[in-house]
Image: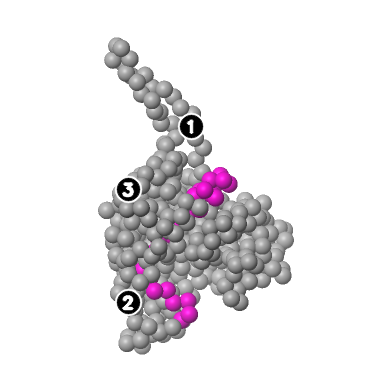
Amino acid sequence: MLIVMMGTLLCGCSVGNQASSDNTVTIEPMEKEEVHTFSFDCIGGQDVMPIVGYYGPQVDSSSAQGQLWPATFSDEVMQMIADCGVNVISANGANYASYPDKTETLLDLGAKYGVGIFVRDSIVNENVKEDTLSMEELDERISAYRNHTAFAGVYVVDEPGTPDFRMEGDERYISNYAQLFQNLDKLNTCAYGNLLPLGRIADVEAYKVYLNEYLNNCPVDFLSYDKYPFVDDDSLTNAAVYFKNLELIRSAADSKGIPFWGFIQAGAQWNDAMNYFDSNGYFPEEGPFMWLINTTLAFGAKGLQYFPLLQPKHFAYALTEPYDFERNGLIGAWNNKNRWWYYAQEANKQIGAIDEVLMNSVNKGILISGDKV
């Protein structure tokens, strides 16, 4: 069950009701507070919470188990996505520079099923250090797809670092993408960027510097970050860091007058190294999964993101069996609905019933109960 315990102040609400001597109640009006919110016309406008899936349809023509991989750019898959309650797709395999037809198909499917699409175009978002498109070049480039009714924005970068903090061999620095973010902002085009969590940058003060570098140089409509706290099983890994991350993200977003979006962990045991291993159970289960959603919303998030939406093929590599399609993903790489699809569907239904309230409320703080972490 989704139970959102929120310290919020709804716009237009009044407090300080007092009963006078004649038993009438006077309502002392209060000023409305500014709500930091953002959504997309293609999914219904400002009162609709973005429910985002990261890793949408992928381009793959190889075979497995004697069969071609099932099509993901299809009505069947988009229907599953929409039925789950996901209304935006961020990262996906339809690189417009290589597969313009796949991008068009995805946008058309998005329009058909009410799902907004961030377009990935390597001409726009790769090699930006050496050759960032000018605003004029960018304007011409994105004109091919930005007027589509399902267009949500341009996918820019995931987990950029800085010269002081980077993964070995990875020079995806925030500074390299700043001009692209600025040009997209001038073109009134939403840019998707997602930041590293506290923990990957261990020191709190260093993390504040990291957030400030991004927000001071990259004008964005929302602050997105990912934190996956269930590493080995349903046991929370370092709850103090998880909550501190939420606190720092919320504060940074508030300082810029924008909302934040948080990620929800749909499974585990990612496999960026493309190794072959057997799964160590399936987690987080329903309780911890709903807990992630509740805590993210309670801190005032105006958007949720599920990772992964569709399980990448290499996230399913196994030893004793060729693949484990149930390890992670709302939808497995064989187009199978996993347990997290059902958990997310239930949560998204309940969010959809009150998202007008969630999107038009101001977070005023958190009431903590239970053991101190």
Q: Quadrant of the C terminus?
A: bottom left
The reply, left or right, for residue 128 in relation to residue 34 is right
Name the element at disc 3: loop
Foreground mark, 1 or 2, reads 2
Question: Is residue 4 among the parts visible in the rendering?
Answer: yes
Please name the amino acid that badge 2 sits on. Answer: Asn
Name the element at disc 2: loop
Residue displayed at 35% across by 63% down: 236
For the image, the number of numbered tags is 3
Question: Is residue 360 among the parts visible in the rendering?
Answer: no
Residue displayed at 54% across by 61% down: 203
Is 192 contained in the magenta span?
no
Residue displayed at 70% across by 65% down: 132
Label 1 or label 2, whichever comes before in sequence order: 1
Label 2 or label 3, whichever comes before in sequence order: 2
Q: Position of residue 172 (x, y in %)?
A: 62, 69
Please name the amino acid that badge 1 sits on. Answer: Lys
Label 1 or label 3, whichever comes before in sequence order: 1
Q: Position of residue 240 (x, y in %)?
A: 42, 57
- Colouring chosen for the image of the structure: one colour
Name the element at disc 1: loop
Residues in magenta, as a range: 249-274
302 versus 320 height, above or below: above
Q: Which residue is mark 2?
A: 280
Q: Which residue is mark 3?
A: 369
Q: Observer-nearest residue: 295 or 357?
A: 295
- Picture disc at residue 32: 1
Tell which residue pokes out farthest to the top in this image: 22
What's the distance in space between the residues labelled 2 and 3, CA to CA?
31 Å
Please name the amino acid that badge 3 sits on. Answer: Ser
